[in-house]
Amino acid sequence: DAKTTQPPSMDCAEGRAANLPCNHSTISGNEYVYWYRQIHSQGPQYIIHGLKNNETNEMASLIITEDRKSSTLILPHATLRDTAVYYCIVRAWALIIQGAQKLVFGQGTRLTINP
Amino acid sequence: DTGVSQDPRHKITKRGQNVTFRCDPISEHNRLYWYRQTLGQGPEFLTYFQNEAQLEKSRLLSDRFSAERPKGSFSTLEIQRTEQGDSAMYLCASSLARDLGGYTFGSGTRLTVV
């Protein structure tokens, strides 16, 4: 798996956009970028994934740079409930389909939304 | 369907005792995963099943740990002769094979060994 690098912590004001960066400079062409978050005392929650195009869903947007070496998760209007640890993970699609690859979590970014 | 259910939510046990946790995945999900998470760390993979077959086990899964998924539905994780180092959150997740979407995790079972 390509290794990911995330800042250990970030703060954001409530109502503002939270932009969480992730570096994955060794990503290969068949690897997807996944984001999960974990709110205190809960299991991780899937947020979004993408390959090379920007993606948006009801939770967030994912912006992947053209060279795919980094990405940014955007929470457009952060609320206090978005306070959590956010994990960026890369996984190869072929191995996902085969079931030969599990999620490998790093330390993530601890995002604190301040009122 | 209410997602992935884990039981119990909390378990306190004395060192040396055996404990068993249960996970009920989303009904149509044929893949089931167990992870362990210690304080301040990200979850670590333990094992996974496709239907009833256990296809991969981590080196973290010592011989005191055993997992089953007898009919390809719910799964159990048993820890024998618990040690204080086993204290952690045990997370279960499920997914569909051949689906690029994310896993669905349960809320976990927090084990404290005293």
Image: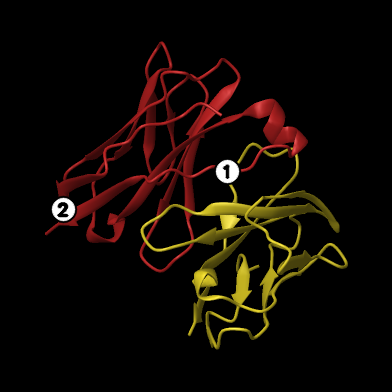
Chain colours: A red, B yellow
- Disc 1 designates what residue? A103
- Disc 2 designates what residue? A14
Among the 4 quarters of the image, the one containing residue A5: top left
Identify the residue at horizontal 66%, vertical 50% (top origin): B59
Other residues around mark 2 within 10 Å, as few (<14) / some (14–19) / many (≥20): some
Q: Secondary structure at mark 2?
A: loop
Marker count (numbered):
2
Q: Is residue A114 left or right of residue B48?
A: left
Disc 2 is attached to a residue of which chain? A
Q: Where residue B94 sits: x, y (%)?
A: 66, 56
- Which one is nearer the viewer's eye here, A74 or A11? A11
Q: Secondary structure at mark 1?
A: loop
Q: Where residue B100 sits: x, y (%)?
A: 64, 36
Q: Amino acid at mark 1?
A: Leu
In this view, B112 is above or below B14:
above
Q: Marks 2 and 1, Cα distance to the nearest angstrom?
A: 30 Å
Disc 1 is attached to a residue of which chain? A
Q: Is residue B108 visible?
A: no
Identify the residue at horizontal 76%, vertical 57% (top origin): B28
